[in-house]
Amino acid sequence: MGLNLIVLVKQVPDTGNVTGNAMKEDGTVNRGALPAIFNPEDLHALEAALTIKESVPGSTVHVLTMGPPTAVQVLKDSLYRGADYVALISDRRFAAADTLATSYALKCAIEKIGDYDMVLCGRQAIDGDTAQVGPQTAEKLGINQITCVSEIVELDAQNRTVVARRSIEGGYEKIRTSLPVLLTITDEGFTPRPPSAIRMMTYKNATTAMSGGDYDETYLTGGSELKAENAIGLWDSNAIGADPEHCGLTGSPTKVKSIELVVLKSEDIRMIENSDEAIGDMVHELVAAHTLG
Amino acid sequence: MAAKNSVMVFVQQDDGQVAEVSVELISKARDLADQLKTDVTAVLIGSTIGKVAESLIPYGVNRLYTVEHKGLEHYTPIPYAKVLTHIVRKVSPQIVLYGATTTGRDLAPRIASALRVGLTADCTDLRIGEYESKGKSYENVLYQIRPAFGGNIIATIVSPERKPQMATVREGVMKMSDPDPGFKGEIIAESVELEPQDFPSEIVERVKEEKLVNLKGAQVIVAGGVGVGSKENFQLIHQLAHTLGAEVGASRAAVDAGFVSKDHQVGQTGTTVRPRLYIACGISGSVQHRAGMDESARIIAINTDPEAPIFQIANYGIVGDLKEVIPRFIKAFKAKA
């Protein structure tokens, strides 16, 4: 019996390349101003799922992402690397979701898929670095979690148990639990495989499938037969049965009050004189900016 | 004064040792509670915790709730979340704080999800203030201040409409206060029903090495290169790192020269890091080294050679001898603290 694996991924702005117009006035991210990439640790989560699929015959890998239509790129990338089924969870109602509202939508989407044995996601996304969506999704699904996983030590598909190694401060733990479970994966293990050339040829023009206001099941035929047409599921809030009250800005208890741009990654190096006063001023500035202290 | 609307701290303990960050948070909670004119409450979960409980009161805890169970000796998410959710529901604090440790970051999101309240990760500062939105104004709101976007912005987050307001807080950013042996607080033993199915995680193995180099998780790294000159001079790097609560890094050349062990190596063949602050001392900045650290949020380069390539990627540059610059740095940091 194969395992049903669901991988949660996110398209993120490349925070290594932040510029002045990266944030909108309301404090949310101006995604248009930044290059968008596959969240690095989510690639490791995908790799973990693909590795499990190879070791347990008959397993399937579903990849879900919530985001604007452009987030379809990370789903294509997932198809290139070996995902069987992918779906984009996208709706205006999901906009400006914090981690609580995000995990609610993901939970609804996972329950739409139905049977699953393992949910995997990156430990955290580089735009927020919160590491909250994984555990919150696990709680909403009512399942156990193992966070900061760098290795799957043992997987017994027959008896439905897994032993995973998780990093803790100054060491590690090996945790055994039964399935289903949610794992958050770090970049310490599961080095992502490159995209497959054949799969890239097949899926580079992959289209999304959505009919009427309702979810179209035809995308499910796309994965196994390597067909680009309708290979990407498109699910809105109705399709996943999400209560609008719990979605997006309405469903988000946290609000961004204000933001302050700290660093413009640039060549404008400031030369500090080798004196008590100049070095003292620099230290003071770093402490005030919460960089030191 | 009552426990309701208090400022609550989740106290993290392991093997009878309280995590330092928990004491830092109690100290901060005391400040916040005084501003809000309310109490500090704390929750301590474990297997035998009597002595530990008493040691916390002097930091200003009015009511400490303890839950003892043999299955709670080490942290695992399901039973800890069940116990803490129960207590938070019962006590109704207005704020709950957790250390942003692997435990706090594993536990707090489950509580937030169960209670459907806001949670802000990895705060570096907490304040009390007002908040206005859509014609409504809120008083005594917790400002949860944190870096985001890879350290490129500092965001102030609020969750004014739902209580409790919850945050995880970075280790070492809140100042631990001096204990007051005369402080009077109450220890309240709570019992929470736990069934066998509340313990789905079995810890098969647990390895903790106190001195393990943790470059990946370090927020600040002080790194030395071959320009440091000798193993003796490398003590300066250790001293600065110690003062700043930072981890020690090194270039490959410094490791090859035998100044420090390979565990400390940053770069293409060592560890890739992205701390808040990277202080490169006597490192010329080869492409291989830069590949392992150029995504640091901020970089300070200290080098005697003004033409060293490290200055091309640094935010701050100091041309000078480490033997002068580092003592000045240490002195300046101690003066602010």
Image (tube, coloured by chain):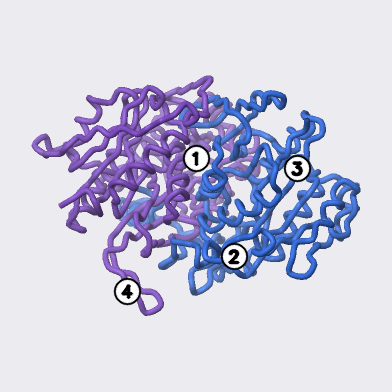
Q: Mark 1 against mark 2, which lies toward the viewer? A: 2
Q: Mark 3 against mark 1, which lies toward the viewer? A: 3
For residue B282, which numbered disc appears in the image? 1
Give me the chain letter of mark 1. Answer: B
Residues marked 4 and 1, same chain: yes
* Three-letter code, disc 3: Val
* Three-letter code, disc 1: Gly
Between B307 and B23, the one lying in front of the other is B23
Furthest-bottom residue in this view: B135
The location of residue A253, given as percent across then percent down, is 44, 61
Q: Secondary structure at mark 3?
A: strand
**Residue B257 shown left or right of residue A1 in the figure:** left
Q: Colour of chain A?
A: blue
Mark 2 — residue?
A94
* Three-letter code, disc 4: Ser
Q: Secondary structure at mark 1?
A: loop
Look at the picture and state if A77 lies above or below A255: above
Look at the picture and state if A5 lies above or below B53: below
Q: Mark 4 against mark 1, which lies toward the viewer? A: 4
